[in-house]
Every structure is written in C-alpha cells, then in structure tokens.
Image (cartoon, rainbow, N blue to C red):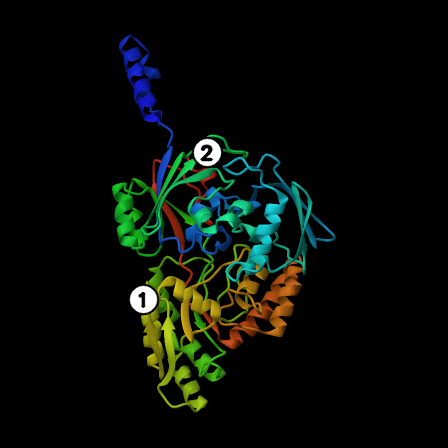
Amino acid sequence: MKRAAALILAVCMLALAACGTPAEEDPAVTGEVAANTEITVGETTVIPDYDPANWYISTQSTLFSNVYSTLIDVISTDDLQLELRANLAESWETEEDGMVWVFHLNPDAVYSNGDKVTAEHVKTCFERNMDNPYTMSYVAMIDSIEVRDENTVAFRLAYPWASVPNCWYMIAVYNVELYDADPEGYMMNPVGSGPYTLESLDEAAGSYTLKLKDEWWGAEKPAIETINVKAIPDPSTAIISLQSGDIDTYAVYGTNMALVEGDPNITTKECISVVPRQLLVNANVEPLNNPLVREAISYAIDYEAVRAATCSGYVSSKDSTIVFGTPEMDIPEGVQGYTYDPDRARELIAESGLATPIDVGELIGGTDNGSAEMVAQYLSEVGIKATVTNYEINAMVQKFMEGSFTLGITTGSGGMSAAENLNNYYGSGQPYNFNKFSNERVDEIISEMMATSDEAETVELLSEALEIIVGECTNFNLGVSAQYIAYNSKYDIPPSYNGIDFIRVR
C-alpha cells in the first residue's frame, strides 16, 4: 500500500511538472533525496540464543535492543565518547551516598500488545539476571530491589559501584507474564516495548526482519521503518555483499578495511574497541598450576606477530599484552606487560623439572583467525605441546563458563569503567572470569575502586592490581582489533558500541 501510494504521488508530480510546475520544485532537479526507510544489516554470526534473559553477546543486540527495552541506553558519540540516554527510565538519582539507585519509569511505556511496563517487570527481569550464569556479572553489585510504586524501582547495592547504571545496557525488560506462560513461544514471537516488532525469523539461517511500530511511546521515533538482518559469518562474503548492495552495513576489522576504504560508495567510522582476544591459561589444572609453566607461556608468544596476522595493522589504541581495556582509562604508566623471549621461556621450562614436551592438552577457540595455530606453534618451539581443537560455539562457551579447559582463546567482555573491567576478568566468582582467577588483594582493590571517584587514587589502585595480575600469568592479550562500521554512503550511521543505534540512523 505504501509503495502504491508512492507511485501515485510520483505520477501526480510528473503531471504537475508537465502542466508548468516550476522546475525547482522537482526533487530530481533540486537534488533532494528520499528518506531512507529500509536497511539490511549484515551480522557476523547467527544469534546463539533468542532468550531475552540471556543477552550476553553483541550479535543479539540488533534484535534485543530494538524489540525490547532497557532502563537506559549507552551510546557512542561520533567522537567516541560514551553517553547515557533515557529509555524505560526517564530519570534516575541516588540515595544514601550512592548505595541506592532509584529509577523513574516513563509512565507511557507499553509493550506491543498494549500492556503497561511496570516496575515489577523491571524487578523480576533483574532478579532473574542475578541468578543467570550468563548475565550475573552485570548485576553482581545488587543486594536487593524494591518496587516503590508502579513506575518507580530502587536498587540497593551490596557495595559501592560508581558506573551504575552504565553496566545495565544489556538487561532486557520483557513481559514477564507472557514469557512465563510460554517461554519458547515468547522468544520466537516476542512482545516487547522497544520501537520495533519481529515480523519474520529464519532461525537456522540467522535472518530476520524488524518493523517499526506505528505508534511508539519513546521520545524519539527512528526513521528506519524496516530492518532486515542477515547472518554472514565469512567477512569476505560480507564485504562483497556490502559492495554489491545486498547488505547496507557490516562490522569491519583488519584486512577487510583495505577492501572498503577506497570505495566511494561506502563510508567507514571507527568504533570504540576495548574487547581483547585473550589467551586463557587455566591455573587450576595440571600442568598449568605450575607457575613456572605459566610464566614460560607468557614469554613463548610473539605478540606482535600474532597481532600483525590477526589485526592486519588495524589495532585499537587500547591494545596491550595485558587483558584490560576501558573507554575511560588506559593502562597506567609503569605497569609492564608481557614480552616475547623464547630463550627465557625454555629456561623456565627446564627450571620446572617437567619432561618435555609438556603436554597441556587442548587449545580451544581462536581457529577463526588463525591465532590458535600460531600460539600452538610458538608453544611447541619452547617445549610445550597444545592440541588445537574446534568446538561448536555454544559448546565452547559452556566449557569456558564451567572452567573445563586447559588453554582457550576467546574474546573478552569489555567494561565501561576500570573497576567493572577488573571485576569482569579477575573478580573472584565472576562468570566471565573463565579461568577462575582469584586473589584476595585484587578483590579488595576492586571494591576500593568502586567506592572512589578520585582519579589519582583509581590509577594507583589499578596499577597495584594489574601488577599482581600480570605476575600470575593467566590471561594474555592477543590483540584488540580496531573496529569499524562500514555502510552504504546513502545512510548516516553513528559509531556502534553495542549494536547499531537505530534511533540515530538516517
């Protein structure tokens, strides 16, 4: 119907022009461009989980952030700064010196079936995240949740956390009653309070279509009416699709940047990139519980060569050999990272007294960009045998979550603040602390960093924590790739942080 109306309008405009309409009113003459109302997004992987309660990777974000709502959006500005934007919560404040955070919901917020979004729904969704191994790290600081009225919810923290509410941008609020009545049905036919509805879904192919609601309660309605999403895991195929116009946007890294940089029809923007590809060393299993073996591994890897091969020269300014990176802070000066010294690695292996080659078992992950094969080769050269093994992504994630591995390569979870980042990777009992790192002093430092807003004190505490962590030799950064969003130049797309911010796409 909309297409037919547009055709009628075009015919009328031609008729008016023939009857003497001034040429400057003809869009073809004035150079006016029709609004972009449809876009096709290429995703790097198929969504592994459609449960809004299990939002743990960015691949889910295009669907979840547009069909569901969060308390607050965290968005990237064009100059790569992070900002908060009201979503369900139209305002918020703190009480009791920051130990209580109070959020006031937009009273007009409703789900796509007309049901009202309530503070009880927010409370229930957050409480379920507190018990969810995939997402509990987001809400680990919450002690209790109080519903004060239909539109007001208060979170009491177990300890100070300066970056609240920055870390809750991946907690979807959904219609609890409908979800509980039929969880599987709800995932495939979600009833959310976001600006879009799910019109179609091919779960196996990883493709789906979102449609903008005719009426939406949000302050700013997106301009894009239809979002088509296609999963294209192979970057080379995705670039060809982008250049041919089969898709309109795709996340681009490394060598693929060279393919799109000179294309006049494609625009690229750098995005915030703090997420490392980390080599995990599980210090809780033999022979990696031997600190000499772990230290030998730290010297065995040619970090620059791995980066050159896997990042193709496009490395984030947040990159280092230490697994740590936040938008707000760099690694303090004076903190020494890991270096490549194979002779020193062989000395440590000899000092360990273990027979060579030392068999450390499987090395899982990292086969998508060749980093696993490179690491295995470097280890073999100093007397350590690691067998590269492939697992289906969900099985691999499960192994990391359980800690049932010896060596593994995976991307990290990032973190907005220094304290949050440390807690994610190194806080005792945190779900994304895959190798179960635990150090009492590091836990104390994390708590102290959460409670202070003094920059100098934060830097001093961070330096102490990182020096302890580096000494344990359990996480090695194999490179933080610079990330770009590439898109058809007829659009204007902001830098992405956690998926594309469609409210600002034009």
Regarding residue 80, the answer to whether it shows in the image is yes
Circle 2 is placed at which residue position? Answer: 213
- Give the class, few, some or many, for how many residues have Cα within 10 Å of label 1's Cα (few <14, many ≥20): few
Is residue 189 shown above or below 431?
A: above
Check disc 2 and give the amino acid type.
Lys
Residue 275 percent location from the top left of the image: 46, 59
Image quadrant where residue 90 sits: top right
Q: Is residue 3 left or right of residue 272?
A: left
**How far across and down, in percent of the image, does residue 272 sit?**
46, 52
Q: Which numbered disc, 1 or 2, marks the residue that appears first in the sequence? A: 2
Looking at the rendering, in which quadrant would you find the C terminus? Answer: top left
| Residue identified by numbered label 1 | 370
Asked if residue 53 lies left or right of residue 489, the reply is right
Do tag 1 and tag 2 residues touch (Cβ < 8 Å)?
no
Residue at 50% across, 44% down = 68
Residue 120 in picture, x, y percent from top left: 62, 46
Q: Residue at x 40, y 62 (%)?
A: 394
